[in-house]
Amino acid sequence: MHELSIATAIVEQAEEIARADGVDGVSSVTVRVGELAGVVPDALHFAFEVARDGTALAAARLVVEQVTARAWCGGCAEEFAVGMPPFFWCPRCDQPSQDLRSGRELEITGVEAVP
């Protein structure tokens, strides 16, 4: 389960952010996870609960914002959802796209301090 290594990295980075801000505890961490990032949100939540024990995030919650995978069709000049499993053919003109615009994100977008 690679989500545990991802959760551990999230906890470590959130702790660094909190320390840099002079904060002793973290109440929540928000992450954006793309549909094609290869991360199962439920597994990430479970792994986060394990990884946060004994850290400044011991009582923190994980907020996962899922990002839909979208590609760009140069022929139509339109963006379209690629779905899961991904299908990179434009539904309008039936041409393949090689321009993935979103869906591979895996990033921390917010760390909220304990009030």
Image: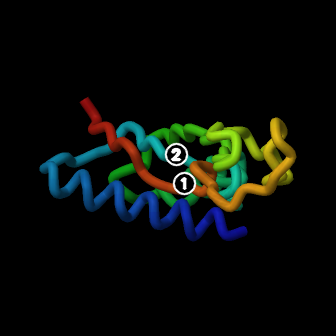
Looking at the picture, tell me which residue is in the foreground, 67 or 111.
Answer: 67
- The disc placed on residue 32 is 2
Q: Quadrant of residue 28?
A: top left
Q: Is residue 97 left or right of residue 33?
A: right
Residue beneath disc 1: 105
User: How many C-alpha atoms fall within 10 Å of the one at disc 2: few (<14), some, or many (≥20)?
Assistant: some
Report the front residue among 112 and 103: 103
* Relative to 110, 32 lies left or right: right
Amino acid type, mark 2: Arg
Q: Residues within 10 Å of mark 1 (few under 14, many from 20)?
A: some
Say which quadrant the N terminus sits in. bottom right
Quarter placement of the C terminus: top left
x then y, percent, for residue 76 = 69, 40
- Residues at marks 1 and 2, CA–CA distance in whole angstroms: 6 Å
Check disc 1 and give the amino acid type.
Glu
Q: How many numbered tags mark residues here?
A: 2
